[in-house]
Every structure is written in structure tokens, then in C-alpha cells.
Image (tube, grey):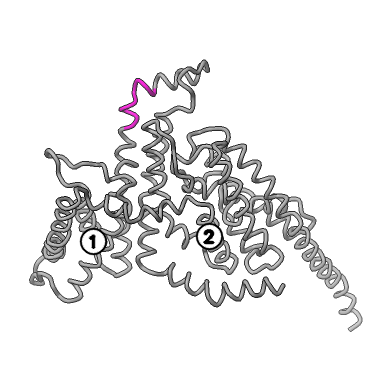
Amino acid sequence: MKLYDAIINVVEKHIAPIATKVGNQPHVRAMRDGFIVAMPFIIVGSFLLVFAFPPFSEDTTNSFGRVWLDFATTHFDTIMMPFSMSMGIMTIFVSLGVAYSLAKSYKMDGITSATLSLMSFLLVAAPATDGGLPTGHMGGTGIFTAVICAFFAVELYRFMKKHNITIRMPEQVPPAIARSFEVLLPVLAVFFTLYPLSIFVQTQYDMLIPDAVMAMFKPLVSASNTLPAIIGALLVCQLLWFAGIHGAAIVVGLLSPIFLTNISANIDAFVAGEPVQNIFTQPFWDFYIFIGGSGATFALVLLMMFSRSIHLKSLGRMSVVPGFFQINEPVIFGSPVVLNPILFIPFVFTPVINATIAYFAVHAGLVGMGVATTPWTAPALIGASWGSGWTLSPVLLVLALLVIDLFIYLPFFKMFEKQLLEQEQSKQESEVAQPGKAATA
């Protein structure tokens, strides 16, 4: 208990305040919300990618697989067009979403800020070539640049508004027209700052700014695929959750650019028929590590369903459907798991064990790496298979991990159940004795 108390003390006094400040920081919130804006387009694009590359070998004799393969080969360009207009240009959605969210946090005009951000990104990432805009950096390689451009555009616009560096129109002018004149100077400011910088990088280093940005972030992206980095992110997430803070919202918000960069690189390799390299993707995080939500609590929910405790049994049956779809707030706050010393160890370390087993399974090639972004609310069995291109091995891995999770949670669950049974029995005895006391009085 002394170790537990020491850990909780550190979390409450040091980690939680910092995490809260980070989570409420406008740029972190904007980045998180911006990726949420882009997510529907990315998910649809990922689904179509899997449809264009059926999970069957070229020489398959399966009739269904043969029909699917032939159809996908014949209509490949038609199937891939929606992918190119969603996943292929996801940085456009990210650029708009991040800038809009950041502008709203400053109580600025969101649409104007979003369009200014998009112009900033296109200026440095897609200079016109032969009368068209190249799309090479509108996918994963432009993610970090899109976020930086969004921050730059909004902060520049905010600075100019704050210091009245703008064109003010008479009050009689309609607001929409006045706003268009107001943004003229920020547009010019973006041109006179980013465009010369882009030309300088092109002429001096023969690359675009997104190439330079990716070179700077390459060590971070590479480090994200290591097991220590994954476990580090997990521990922060779980400790925050245990203290009652939405750890996933904070940690995933910071990890989103890495997730999208890694999955985009995997998709490029997958389409080109090359080896897929990145382990740490959103499907890995959602469906191997967190089966049933943060803490991998689906195993706990299954144990609760057959508990002798009335409270746990009712909560388990109420939580099983949300837990199947990766939603576990009912069990986290209803048990409660939060600040529950008995469940501290399994809640914090079960995801770590899942991550370790899954990491080595993926690294050894027993399970395919993620090549599709999926809804985090997809059931783990479906999401894991979908994320790796509808293969069977992820399903088997999720089932194996779920069995392991059950054994990890079981002894701690029994201790918690015993505690609640004693409380329930004491309450029943008290209720039975109460009428007698009243009669005596």
C-alpha cells in the first residue's frame, strides 16, 4: 500500500496538474479536434483501400476471392479515386480542422482562419507544377507541416488583429464584405513570410518544406515504433485515467500526428507492394492494447457479469454492450476503477502486457501491421482485422489477449468482489434489523 500511495501521490501532485494544463492548452486541443474533423474521411478512404486490395492471394481458388480479385483489378482506378480524394488529401482536412478549432478557442472567425491555414499549407507543400497542384505531400508526409501551418496562420492572424494591423471598413459595409477586407493583410503577411521561405528551401536544399519538416520529425516517428515508447505513452494514459482524468483524450491528442504519419507510410508501402514498416498505429493502440477501452476492461466486464455481487453483476450486464464497442466509462466510474487501490495494478499494467505481446507478435510477422484507419468504436475483433486488411490472425491475437486479460484481472476482481459482498451483506443485515429497532422504540 505504501508503494500505491506513493504512486498516487506523484500522479495527483505532479503528473495530473501538468497533464491537465497540456490537455487544456489551446494548440493541443486544436490538434486533437482537427484530427477528429479529418477522421471520417480517413476511415472511408481506408475502407476503400482494403476493398481495392482483397485479402486473397493472386492464385486463389476460392470462388468469392476470385470474383473479388477480378473485380478489383478491372475497376482499380475507379475504386481508388475516392481513396485519393479522402485519405490521399487528408492534410487538407487536418489543416482546416486544426485552424478552425484554434481560432474558435481565441474567439476568432473560424472559417477565415481555416482558409488562411489551407492557403499557408498549399503555399509551402504544393507549389503549382505544369498548371496543377501536386498531391505528394497531401497525405501522411504533410501532416506535421499542415499542423505547423495552421498554428502559424492563426497566430499571425491573431497578432495582427490584436495590434489593429488590418483594413477597417465603415460600419455601413456588410459584415461579410468587411471581414474579407480584414483578412487581406494577413493573407499578404503569409505570402511575404512563407513563400520566400519555401523558395529558399527549394533553391538551397532542393526540397519542399514538408520534406524538411519530416526530416526533423523522423527521429520522433522512428522512436514511436519502439516498445519503450509505446509503454511510456501507455503508462501516462493509464495513470491519468486512474486519477480520474481522461488520459486517452490527452495522450491520443498528442499521438494523432504520429498515428496518421505511420499509417500513411504503411498504406504507401502496401499499395506499392513493399514491406510495411510501422507497428505503432491507431488500430494497434485501440484493438490490441485497449480491448474494451482504456485499461483493457472488457475482461473485467465479463467477470462482473457473473459476479455474486449484485452491484458488480448489474454493472457488468449494463456495461457489456458499450464495452464491446470500446466504450468503458460506465465501468471505470461505476465500479469504480478510478482511485480503487485493489484494481490499480490490473488497470494500469494489463494494457502494458497486451502491448508487449502484440508488439512481438507483429514484429515477428505473426500478425499484419496496420494499413487502415478504423473507427475506435469498432469492436476489437472487427477493428483489428479491418485495420490489418481483413486478415484472420489479428482476430486470434485479440482472443488470446482477452483470455490473458481475464487471468490478470481475476485475482484482483475476486478481492474487490469479496469486499463488496461484505458491504452488501452488512447492508442487508442492517435493513433487516432496522424494523426491530423501530418496534422496540
The spot of residue 149 in percent (x, y) is 25, 58
Percent x, y for residue 272? 36, 32
Residue placed farthest to the right in the image? 440
Q: Residue at x 31, y 64 (%)?
A: 102
Q: Which residue is mark 1?
A: 113
Q: Position of residue 124 (x, y in %)?
A: 20, 52
Q: Position of residue 413 (x, y in %)?
A: 74, 58
Task: Give whichever of discs 1 and 2 has the lower sequence position.
Answer: 1
Q: Quadrant of the C terminus?
A: bottom right
**260 on left or right of 363:** left
Residue interval drawn in magenta: 72-80
Q: Is residue 189 left or right of residue 151?
A: left
Q: Is residue 218 visible?
A: yes
Type of amino acid at the residue the image marks with label 2: Gly
Q: Marks 1/2: CA distance?
A: 35 Å
Position of 221 compared to 331: left or right? Answer: left
Identify the amino acid type marked 1. Answer: Ser
Q: Is residue 50 above or below residue 106?
A: above
Q: Residue at coordinates 59% horizontally, 37% vertically from top-left?
A: 395
- Crowding at dot 2, Cα within 10 Å, few <14 / some 14-19 / many 20+, comes out as few
Check residue 77 for magenta coloring. Answer: yes
Confirm or deny contact between disc 1 and disc 2 (CB under 8 A).
no
Q: Nearer the viewer, mark 1 or mark 2?
A: 2
Q: Is 257 within the magenta?
A: no
* Label 1 crowd bin: few (<14), some (14–19), many (20+), radius 10 Å: many
Q: Report the residue marked by disc 2.
A: 232
